Image (cartoon, rainbow, N blue to C red):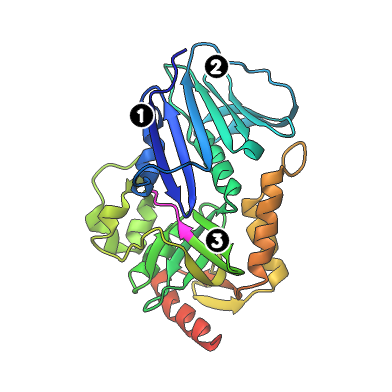
Amino acid sequence: MTGPSAQGCYALNGQIVGISAERPELWQDLDRMIGSLRAAGPVEPGFRIRIVQTQSLAETPEGVVAFDGEVPEDGHCRMIDNGEVIHLIFPGRQTASIHAGEGWAEIIVRPDTKITWTLWMLVLDAALDAGGQHMLHTAGLTLPDSDALVLIHAPSGTGKTTTSLALASQGFGLCSDDAMILNFASGKAVAWGLPRHVKIHRKTAEMVPLVSPCLGPSWDRNGEQAVSLERLREIVRVEDSGPRPIAALLHLARSADDQNRLVAMARTDAMVALAADNVRTGMTGLLPLQKRRLETIVRLVSTVPTFTLEVGPRPADAAALIRSALAAQG
């Protein structure tokens, strides 16, 4: 086992995350996403991640099984809840131990494997949570001529990316099509977008032809292409990762009659819908991080207007509905 010799730091809206490993290549997949957030100059991390390569994995930590099953794209994994420590295990490949209360995590990976995206997201979640922030599965777009943004949430496959790009074609600014980081500054809800690539589906390309210049000839097995924010910035406004006030929360749904609609949504219904897609209940109930995320969701829906946005085959037309509704809110 070789000790860490490479180090990196990232500034996540005030929360400094430090990473150490034998080689920087061990966290290059994460760096591809948050490389634009590298911290400048010497800074003291508020959360530390240590990566170690070894052939020997400790796969039977003490604790209670919180999850044991298949994860899409990443295969079989187990989560062990040991109270103060959460363990994630991909048998024969890698493990992670998250010491949230002490502000650090350790990733142990075999030399012949890559760190899974699921593991990275769990560790990043813990680092953000340690700084009072929470990642939500939502899109985020700034309003035309405004720094305020709307959050758009829905289960995967409903059309967040298509709707986001359609709105961006109408002057909205894209913060993220899939992952927004939420916290409360001076009692007000603010959010910023995780600077990750946008996965554009064939159907999205058909409905939003504006994106065609960004696409190549090859599609993956899911009929998608990953497009960088830098490439998208050539055709639409892509915002930086600064925190912005939240003007409204929109629950995205497919229109039954192909008509676009924006109607007020009861706050309780909005909370249930957002929590259903963002708060995970394991075999041991809610983990502390999930409880804090739920509390943040409750606080969010109590402070911003909530709507249902039904979209048909012309999602760009929803832009006028959103602008009109928020103008009426004053």
85 and 137: which is toward the camera: 85
Can you tell which quarter of the image residue 234 is in?
bottom left
Query: Which segment did they paint magenta?
Result: 192-196
Name the residue located 27 percent from the left edge and 54 percent from the top edge. Answer: 230
Label 1 residue SS: helix
Q: Amino acid at mark 2?
A: Gly
**Among the two numbered marks 2 and 1 on one chain, the one whose residue lies closer to the N terminus:** 1
Task: Please rate how many residues cluster around mark 1, counting C-alpha atoms within 10 Å: few if below 14, some from 14 to 19, many from 20.
Answer: some
Label 2 residue SS: loop
Is residue 238 at all visible to an observer of this figure?
yes
Q: Amino acid at mark 3?
A: His
Residue 153 marker = 3
Above or below, 208 against 216 in this view is below
Name the residue located 36 percent from the left edge and 45 percent from the top edge. Answer: 38
4 and 318: which is toward the camera: 4
Nearest-to-viewer mark from 2 and 1:
1
